[in-house]
Amino acid sequence: MEYVLTLALCLSLSSSCSPPIVHEIKFKDLYDCIQGGYEESVGIMETVGREDTNKTGASVQFICKKIQTKES
């Protein structure tokens, strides 16, 4: 089994999220996928920046989904 990471940028002030973005790298297990989700989230939040985060209530949501592979 492998895992795919999906992320979305959400704004609490408008109660909306961007369309989900599927990460191009497949992860070998759930642990690695979750670690990747947190790392990607930090990068996104650094891009948004402190001021816009506080102004819009920005946050990142992510989920790791198990996918079937030819090997499994």
Image (cartoon, rainbow, N blue to C red):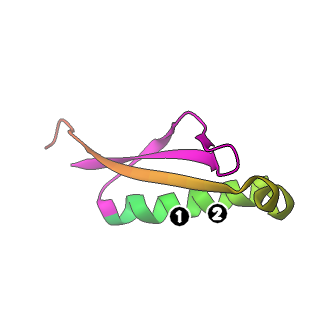
In the rendered view, does 59 fall on the left or right side of 51? left
Q: Residue at x 41, y 51 (%)?
A: 63
Quadrant in which residue 25 is drawn: top left
In the rendered view, does 4 fall on the left or right side of 72? right
**Where does the image place residue 51, in percent across and percent down from the top left?**
86, 61
Q: Residue at x 13, y 44 (%)?
A: 72
Q: Disc 1 versus disc 2: distance between alpha carbons?
A: 6 Å
In the rendered view, does 5 fall on the left or right side of 10? left
Quadrant in which residue 47 is drawn: bottom right
Which residues, given as a range, are shown in magenta? 1-30
Q: Is residue 8 magenta?
A: yes
Relative to 50, is 3 above or below? above
- In this rendered view, identify the residue nearer to me: 50 or 29: 50
Q: Residue at x 61, y 47 (%)?
A: 10
Q: Residue furthest right?
A: 51
**Where does the image place residue 1, in percent across and percent down from the top left?**
21, 49
- Kind of residue at badge 1: Tyr
Relative to 51, is 8 above or below? above
Relative to 18, is 48 above or below? below
Q: SS at mark 2?
A: helix
Q: Residue furthest left?
A: 72
**Where does the image place residue 67, in percent across and percent down from the top left?**
25, 41
Residue 38 is marked as 1
Q: Main secondary structure of the magenta part?
A: strand
Q: For mark 2, what is the residue?
A: 42
How many labels, in total? 2
- Kind of residue at badge 2: Val
Crowding around mark 1 (Cα neighbors within 10 Å: few <14, some 14 to 19, many 20+) is some
Q: Residue at x 56, y 33 (%)?
A: 19
Whether tag 1 and tag 2 are in contact, CB under 8 A, the answer is yes
